[in-house]
Image (cartoon, grey):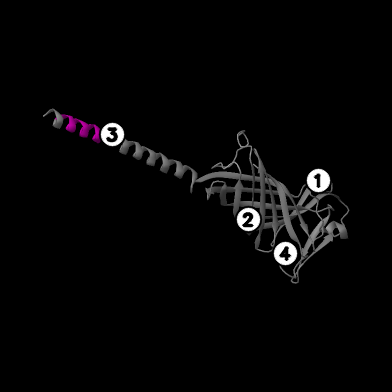
Amino acid sequence: SEDVIAQESHDDDDDDDWSDRNTDNENKDEWKNHYRGSRWGRTSQSFNFDVGTNNYLEDGKFPDSTNSLYSVRPWGSWYVSLASIQRTRLGSKFFLEWGIGMSWYTFKFQKDNILIVKDNNGIQFVEDMRDVDFDKSKLSASFVQASLVPIVDFGGHSRKTRIWDGWNNAFRFGVGPYIGYRISSHSKIVYDDGDREKDKETDSFYLNNFRYGLRLQIGYRSTDLFFNYDLNELFAEGRGPKLNAFSFGVIF
């Protein structure tokens, strides 16, 4: 009958509407999953290039205050680090930056004629009294280093801001631990006695094999700054002065 045909036609329309609604729901679910995956738990990778300066504290003071021979010049005492950094989203504006890389300490002494003398008891810093024109003296060490820094980024961006990005106007900061293992260290003194000479000695100088501390990162737009502070001492206990090293500079 016409009523039955109309009813069947109506049922077919309902089936089509139901099918369309299911398709719409599936598309919405797919979009939600994609959106959720792009914002939550996603990890991006970048390279951090840190450039800054080093110094250290002795009992909370700079060694310059006591005219110690191991006082350093901030200009020339460079800190350099290159690391592969992963950025994992943990929340809307909360991230975890973790990675591994290499770092290099250089401590350039205030006086240009400082020698590091090592014996079985420890090290001593003495002045080289040769009659030559001294240019510089320094102590350098390199480390394999890992870091783990929770970051609050008020912009909520899933990847680190690059120097050519202009869209991230939000403030970001984080504090977290790092640890490093020393793989090399040496001292160098440069002088001129008619020819330019370099006396380089590769040794441990009783430096601690491990260094660990806390790292602070602060950023705005395309500029990020860092501050590292070693919680353990630079030299092994009883083998050298009680110094805690720190570094600060710019992250590229």
How many discs mark residues in the rendered view? 4
Left or right, 92 with respect to 208, comes to left
What numbered label is drawn on residue 176?
Answer: 2
The amino acid type found where label 3 is placed reads Asp
Does the magenta segment cover residue 14?
Answer: yes
What numbered label is drawn on residue 17?
Answer: 3
Q: Position of residue 195 (x, y in %)?
A: 81, 45
Q: Position of residue 237 (x, y in %)?
A: 72, 69
The amino acid type found where label 2 is placed reads Gly
Q: Nearer the viewer, residue 49 or 76?
A: 49
Residue stretch rendered in magenta on the structure: 5-18
Q: Image quadrant of residue 17?
A: top left
Q: Earlier in the sequence, mark 1 or mark 3?
A: 3
Q: Residue at x 65, y 57 (%)?
A: 184
Q: Which residue is mark 4?
A: 235
Q: Earlier in the sequence, mark 1 or mark 4?
A: 1
| Callout 3: SS | helix
User: Is label 1 or label 4 in front?
Assistant: 4
Q: Position of residue 238 (x, y in %)?
A: 75, 70
What's the distance in space between the residues labelled 1 and 4, CA to CA?
Answer: 34 Å
User: Is label 2 or label 3 in front?
Assistant: 3
Q: Nearer the viewer, residue 23 or 59?
A: 23
What's the distance in space between the residues labelled 2 and 3, CA to CA?
Answer: 54 Å
| Callout 4: SS | loop
Q: Position of residue 24 (x, y in %)?
A: 34, 36
The amino acid type found where label 4 is placed reads Phe
Q: Residues within 10 Å of mark 4 (few under 14, many from 20)?
A: many
What numbered label is drawn on residue 195?
Answer: 1
Confirm or deny contact between disc 4 and disc 3 (CB under 8 A): no
